[in-house]
């Protein structure tokens, strides 16, 4: 595990990519950006990773409820393969994100966030949940 810099998480969507970053101690996740899938997403991700000095990227891997690799997961794998070509010096970790969107939706509902605002921020919220889950898991392994 590479320890320098922050750990970044990506939630790869069809139209947008949510991005979150850890603090320098790798304890908490913080929202960063929503990146549009407009053909420039790989350049935008690379620029943000460099600005955060990120050496590890956790990518939400949307397995089916049975834990299998389905259609959406195949799309994410294709994205990851392209990302690996551009970022050979960055460790990429696939992280199970099966219930992330459900948790994010319930969180927005609990907070009284309207559906329009939820749509605008759900991608970064999902990236934040992915990263915090990974950080919690990692932290438990060190204790």
Image (tube, grey):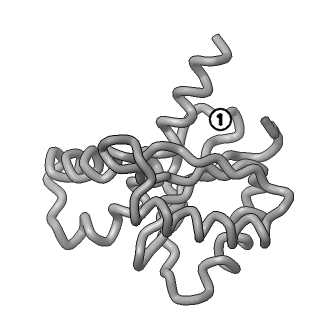
- Is residue 43 shown left or right of residue 78? right
- Left or right of residue 22: residue 67: left
Q: Count of labels shown?
A: 1
Q: Position of residue 83 (x, y in %)?
A: 69, 68
Farthest residue toward the bottom?
39
| Residue positioned 33% across, 61% down in the render | 122
Say few, some or many: other residues with alpha carbon within 10 Å of mark 1 (under 14 / 14 to 19 / 20 or more): many
**Residue 61 appears at what percent x and percent y?**
49, 52
Q: Residue at x 49, y 80 (%)?
A: 36
Residue 98 image position (x, y, % from top left): 36, 46
Residue drawn at (16%, 67%) of the image: 115
* Observer-nearest of 89 and 51: 89
95 or 33, which is in the foreground? Answer: 95
Q: Indicate whether 40 appears above or below 62.
A: below
- Give the quarter of the image for residue 113: bottom left
Residue furthest out toward the top: 143
Q: Which residue is mark 1?
A: 26
In the depicted structure, whether residue 133 falls above or below residue 31:
above
Q: Residue shown at 30%/53% (left/top)? A: 101
Residue 52: name its quadrant: bottom right
> Measured along the vertical axis of the image, is residue 87 above or below residue 20?
below
User: In which quadrant of the rendered image does the N terminus lie?
Assistant: top right
In the picture, measured across the screen, residue 23 lies left or right of residue 137, that is: right
- Above or below, 78 against 142 in this view is below
From the top left corner, tell me how far across and down residue 121 is, in percent. Answer: 35, 65
Q: Is residue 80 left or right of residue 29?
A: right
Quadrant of the image for the C terminus? top right
Q: Secondary structure at mark 1?
A: loop
């Amino acid at each position: 595990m590479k320890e320098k810099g922050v750990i970044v998480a990506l939630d790869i969507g069809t139209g947008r990519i949510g991005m979150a970053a850890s603090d320098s101690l790798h304890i908490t996740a913080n929202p960063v950006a929503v990146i549009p899938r407009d053909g420039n997403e790989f350049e935008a991700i690379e620029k943000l990773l460099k600005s955060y000095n990120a050496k590890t990227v956790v990518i939400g891997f949307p397995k089916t409820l049975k834990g299998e690799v389905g259609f959406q997961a195949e799309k994410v794998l294709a994205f990851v393969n392209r990302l690996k070509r551009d970022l050979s010096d960055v460790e990429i970790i696939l992280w199970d994100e099966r219930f992330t969107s459900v948790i994010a939706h319930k969180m927005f509902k609990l907070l009284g966030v309207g559906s329009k605002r939820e749509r605008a921020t759900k991608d970064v919220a999902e990236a934040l949940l992915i990263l915090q889950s990974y950080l919690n898991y990692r932290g438990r392994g060190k204790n």
